[in-house]
């Protein structure tokens, strides 16, 4: 019997007795016992006491002992399991108590108190096994985008995210970047690569700006696998309940479109009125030890996460940038565009942003017979309505100081230093530093290091937008 088979076997027993599948801690106990490791190691990994692990383990041994009608405990668990062969693991899992466990040559026929149909109803439809008979997590991806057939290579970014989540056990990762850069797409494609490490994967969007207590209720109900739950009224108590849940059950929770709860018209720092308490959620998720991971997709990161960010911190920021030139070229090729010697110019202009390239690719097809050279011969550059609408949304989120600095930065084509900006602008140095930081966190300006000097430049599409679509005050 392999460890995976043992986990499935015990999961079947526990589900039958309790109506719940094994949670992460129980699986870790079984894994450690199978591998001859100590409970203290599990306790350390799960940020709980050895005593707590011992209690959870003791309950587990009791359940297994009852089912197998034999005293099972830590020291004889592996030997006992090795005496067992599960005659048909997948049929045990799929059809509940219909199959028999075979103990040596003797068939152990468990009592058939549940009809197969009843057991089937209890099984969540979203939790299945893969071809290797490994338990897959429960997936609730109703708010997630579909996986599309064409996915342009993001392997470097995926590797970093996987390392942060699986190896560094990060608890809170913010993926930030301008609209269309591919935040939702990359995280959707990350899920199949890491799902076997989680018990539950939940994707929620904050597009409709749900208040915190609604989001918490929804998450707690989904993780608990119930449709209605009585929650304490107090948000702190609800937060504690969520933390308790995600300690025992290893969840990957994606909150998409987080910018919707952050306010516009100011430097990045504030929440919209009525959403300030999300800050407590993000702080608690980042600060307290647990075994789950939250991913926040946002145009800009919530400010408090910067307090935690460090190389070895479980809270990280991933600023997503465009596709590599090679991949962006592949995209233009697939779209049937011509004049490949001009592609680099087009890619630089549109910052390798997959959505921008898709939109401009369509325009070039429709108006310029697929010729990139013809399109680029026109000045100023054309920004389609879809694109200007997106840029307008970004522009309206800016504070007055940011707008002022951006129009100043957009005047020339060259990058400028802090001292040049201080000379030209009306801003004091603290105002300038704060404004530059805010624009950088919103992914609207690029930094270039030249001869030990940091220079700033507005991203090309945004510069065109400001110069040609925004009239100076
Ligand atoms: N790697 C990729 N391969 C193929 N298409 C991609 C890729 N990345 C993004 N796209 C496409 O670009 C568009 C924008 O991507 P996506 O919705 O993921 O961006 P986003 O950063 O989440 O934007 P927003 O902030 O507006 O939600 C989508 O149509 C998506 O299919
Ligand atoms: Mg998105």
Image: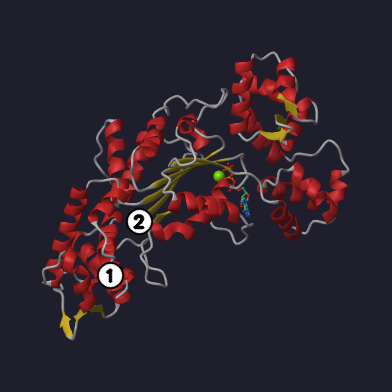
Secondary structure at badge 1 equals helix
Image x and y of residue 446, in percent:
68, 35
Judge left or right: residue 461 versus residue 117. Answer: right
Q: Report the residue marked by disc 1.
A: 6
Image x and y of residue 40, in percent:
24, 52
Q: Report the residue marked by disc 2.
A: 199
Label 2 CB sits under 8 Å from any ligand 2 atom: no
Q: Which residue is drawn at 20% across and 71% down?
A: 115
Q: Which of 40 and 281 is in front in this view?
A: 40
Q: Marks 1/2: CA distance?
A: 17 Å
Q: Which mark is residue 97?
A: none
Is 439 located above or below residue 375 in the figure?
above
Label 1 CB sits under 8 Å from any ligand 1 atom: no
Asked if residue 123 can be seen in this view, the reply is yes
Image x and y of residue 378, in percent:
87, 41
Q: Which residue is drawn at 40% across and 72% down?
A: 132
Ligand 2: give its quadrant: top right
Say which quarter of the image contains residue 414: top right
Is 116 located above or below residue 404 in the figure?
below
Judge left or right: residue 37 versus residue 68. Answer: right
Secondary structure at badge 2 equals loop
Residue found farthest to the front: 452
Q: Which of 75 and 217 is in front in this view?
A: 75
Judge left or right: residue 367 versus residue 473. Answer: right
Task: Choose the circle earlier in sequence order: 1 or 2.
Answer: 1
């Amino acid at each position: 019997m392999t460890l995976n088979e043992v986990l499935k076997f015990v999961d079947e027993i526990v589900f039958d007795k309790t109506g719940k599948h094994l949670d992460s801690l129980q699986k870790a106990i079984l894994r450690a016992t199978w591998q001859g490791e100590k409970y203290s190691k599990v306790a350390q990994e799960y940020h709980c006491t050895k005593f707590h692990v011992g209690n959870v383990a003791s309950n587990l041994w009791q359940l297994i002992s009852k089912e197998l009608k034999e005293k099972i405990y830590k020291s004889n668990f592996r030997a006992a399991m090795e005496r067992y062969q599960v005659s048909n693991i997948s049929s045990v899992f799929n059809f509940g108590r219909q199959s028999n466990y075979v103990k040596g040559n003797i068939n152990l026929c468990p009592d058939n108190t549940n009809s197969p149909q009843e057991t089937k109803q209890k099984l969540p439809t979203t939790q299945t096994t893969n071809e290797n008979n490994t338990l897959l997590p429960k997936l609730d991806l109703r708010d997630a985008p579909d996986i599309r057939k064409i996915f342009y290579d993001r392997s470097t970014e995926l590797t970093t995210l996987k390392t942060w989540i699986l190896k560094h056990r990060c608890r809170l990762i913010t993926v930030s970047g301008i609209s269309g850069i591919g935040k939702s797409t990359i995280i959707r494609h990350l899920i199949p690569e890491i799902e076997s490490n989680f018990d539950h994967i939940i994707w929620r969007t904050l597009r409709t700006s749900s208040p915190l207590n609604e989001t918490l209720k929804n998450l707690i109900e989904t993780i608990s696998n119930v449709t209605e739950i009585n929650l304490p009224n107090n948000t702190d108590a609800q937060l504690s309940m969520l933390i308790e849940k995600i300690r025992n059950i290893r969840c990957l929770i994606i909150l998409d479109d987080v910018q919707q709860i952050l306010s516009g018209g100011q430097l990045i720092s504030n929440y919209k009125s009525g959403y300030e308490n999300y800050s407590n959620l993000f702080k608690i998720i980042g600060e307290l030890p647990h075994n789950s991971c939250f991913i926040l997709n946002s145009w800009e990161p919530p400010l408090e996460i910067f307090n935690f960010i460090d190389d070895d911190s479980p809270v990280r920021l991933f600023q997503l940038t465009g596709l590599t030139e090679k991949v962006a070229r592949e995209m233009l090729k697939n779209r049937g565009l011509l004049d490949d010697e001009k592609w680099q110019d087009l890619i630089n202009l549109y910052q390798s942003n997959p959505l921008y390239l898709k939109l401009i690719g369509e325009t070039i097809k429709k108006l310029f017979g697929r010729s990139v050279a013809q399109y680029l011969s026109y000045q100023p550059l054309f920004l389609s309505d879809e694109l200007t609408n997106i840029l307008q949304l970004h522009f309206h989120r800016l504070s007055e100081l940011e707008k002022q600095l951006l129009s100043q930065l957009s005047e020339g084509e060259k990058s400028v230093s802090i001292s040049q900006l201080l000379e030209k602008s009306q801003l004091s140095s603290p105002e300038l530093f704060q404004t530059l930081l805010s624009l950088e966190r919103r992914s609207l300006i690029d930094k270039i290091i030249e001869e030990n000097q940091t220079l700033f430049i507005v991203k090309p599409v945004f510069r065109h937008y400001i110069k040609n679509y925004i009239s100076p005050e």
